[in-house]
Image: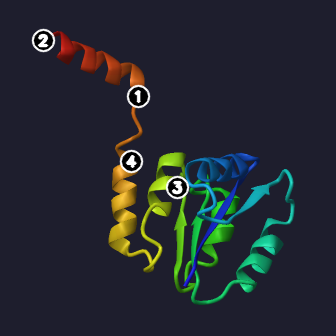
């Protein structure tokens, strides 16, 4: 079993996220990116070729940008594939949290939900956060 990473987004976000993975986890993952509607105008065909080339025992962790976007809908066609996980609304903390999970076993529902809960709480409006913490520090 090998964990594979697929990032598919509108425009060039996928390449930026892949660069972030390489920066924090050099050489740990080979990341396949598809930048829809920029460098790739045949997203469905590229996805089909990608999935057809994968070993059925490999785990594919896919990340997209927008829940109701076309990219996520195309990735959703593969949701019944064994060992396939699709995340949307992807940001760097979620991507890194998922990929830091041990690779010796398939990801579990508990692993995935834990990553989502952890990363959801990291989305903060910093202006208010700083103001609230400054008030606490002053007391």
- Residue 113 falls left or right of residue 93: left
User: What label does residue 65 carry, if any?
Assistant: none
For mark 1, give the secondary structure: loop
Residue at numbered disc 4: 120
| Residue beneath disc 2 | 139
Residue at x 45%, y 78% (from the top left corner) = 104
- The residues tagged by marks 2 and 4 sit, at their Cα atoms, a distance apart of 29 Å
Q: Quadrant of residue 36?
A: bottom right
Instruction: Look at the numbered discs 3 and 4 and tell me whether their residues touch, using CB distance below 8 Å.
Output: no
Decide which of tag 1 and tag 3 comes sooner along the chain: 3
Q: Give how far across and how far down residue 46 sits, in percent.
A: 81, 71
Distance in Å between CA atoms under marks 3 and 2: 37 Å
Q: Name which of mark 3 and mark 2 comes first in the sequence.
A: 3
Which of the marked residues, 3 or 4, is nearer the chain's N terminus? 3
Vertical arrangement, residue 71 with respect to residue 85, above or below = above
Q: Return the residue at label 3.
A: 95
Residue 34: image location, x then y, percent:
76, 60
- State which mark lies toward you, 3 or 4: 3
């Amino acid at each position: 079993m090998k964990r594979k990473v697929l990032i598919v987004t509108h425009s060039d976000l996928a390449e930026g996220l892949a660069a972030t993975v390489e920066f924090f986890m050099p050489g740990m993952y080979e990341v396949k990116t598809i930048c829809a509607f920029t460098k790739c105008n045949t997203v469905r065909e590229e996805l089909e070729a990608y999935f057809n080339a994968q070993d059925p025992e490999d785990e594919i962790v896919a990340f997209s940008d927008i829940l109701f976007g076309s990219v996520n809908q195309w990735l959703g066609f593969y949701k019944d594939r064994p060992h396939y996980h699709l995340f949307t609304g992807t940001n760097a903390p979620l991507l890194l949290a998922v990929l830091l999970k041990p690779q010796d076993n398939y990801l579990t529902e508990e692993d995935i939900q834990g990553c989502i809960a952890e990363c959801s709480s990291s989305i903060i409006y910093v202006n208010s956060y700083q103001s609230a913490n400054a008030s606490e520090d002053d007391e």
